[in-house]
Amino acid sequence: MTLDRDRVARPLVVAVANQKGGVGKTTTVINLATAFAATGHKVLVVDADAQGNASTGLGVEQAARTATTYDLLNGERVTPAPTMIPGLTIIPATADLSGAEVELVDVPDRQNVLARALSEVAAGHELVLVDCPPSLNLMTINALVAADEVLVPMQCEFFALEGLSLLLDTIERVSGTHNPGLHIGGIVLTMFDRRNRLSREVERDVRRVMGDVVYHTLIPRNVRVSEAPSHGMPVILYDVDCAGARAYVRLAREFLRRHATQSEGAA
C-alpha cells in the first residue's frame, strides 16, 4: 500500500494537532512516521513544539539539533537531520522555538511563514508530519496553513468532544481565510481502555458526532508506549510486538488505505 507517487514532487502535509496536552500527539507522529518509512516512504517530521519531544522520541540528541524549526522560520537554509530509521528525517526543535511566537507577530503574512519554508525543504518527500504544540497559537496556525489535512489524536476522556469543538472552529477559520483545502483527515482515539466504561462511551459519542472521519484503529493504553520515548525511540522499534506498536502499525495501514482510496476516486 503506497501513497500517490506524485507526492514525491508535492508531499502530503499533515498537521498533527490538538490544543490539549497529553493526548498522544507526539507519540502518534513518531510512530506513524516510523511505520510509513518502514514501508518505503520518504517521510519528514517537522517538530513545531518548543518542548522538542518528537526530536527526543526519534533519538535526536540536543547537541545534534544544529538546524532547527526555529532556523527554518527565520528563513535559513535547513537540511533535515537523519534519524535511526532509513527514509525518515526530521527538522528538530529546541527551546529557541518558544521565541518564534513573539518574533512572528511583526512578520508580514506571518501565518504563511512555515508554508513558504516547507515548499523547499520538503521537496523529495512523500509525506510531511508536523508535530504541533499543545495550544492554538501562531505556530499551530502556521502548521494548519501549511497542511493539506489535520490528524487529531484524541484521548478517550470526558472532555474530549469539548476540546475538539474548539479545534474544529480554528480549522474552519483557517480554511475560510488562508487555506481553502484544509480539512480533518482523521481523528485517532488514543489511550483507549476497553475495560473502562468511560473509554467505550467516549468512543461511541465521538463516532456518533464525527462519523467516518474517526479511524477504526484504537490506540490502547500501553506501558511500553510510555517507556519508549525515554529510550529515544518509537515504540515500533522499542517493542514491535507490544499492543501499542501493533496498533500504530494498523493505524498506518488504515491511513494509507484511506489515501489510496481517495486517489482512486479522484482519478
Image (cartoon, rainbow, N blue to C red):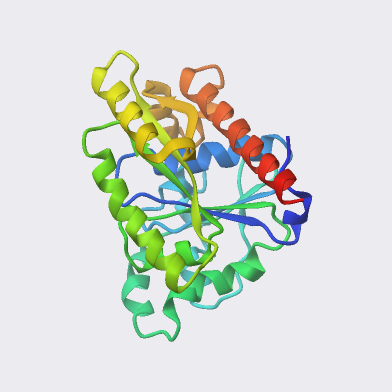
Residue, x 58% and y 28% (percent of image)?
249
Q: Is residue 104 above or below residue 21?
A: below
Q: Is residue 80 left or right of residue 131?
A: right
Q: Nearer the viewer, residue 130 or 6?
A: 6
Numbered disc total:
0
Residue, x 41% and y 59% (percent of image)?
94
Q: Is residue 130 left or right of residue 2?
A: left
Q: Is residue 247 above or below residue 186?
A: above
Residue, x 41% and y 52% (percent of image)?
52
Q: Is residue 20 visible?
A: no
Q: Position of residue 188 (x, y in %)?
A: 44, 36
Q: Is residue 134 left or right of residue 108?
A: left
Q: Is residue 112 visible?
A: yes
Q: Position of residue 257 (x, y in %)?
A: 65, 35
Q: Is residue 227 above or below residue 36?
A: above
Q: Is residue 17 above or below residue 101?
A: above
Q: Is residue 42 left or right of residue 233?
A: right
Q: Quadrant of residue 228?
A: top left
The outermost residue toward the left is 158
The outermost residue toward the top is 195
Q: Position of residue 150 (x, y in %)?
A: 48, 52
Q: Position of residue 59 (x, y in %)?
A: 52, 42
Q: Nearer the viewer, residue 138 or 101?
A: 138
- Where does the N terminus fall, quadrant-wise? top right
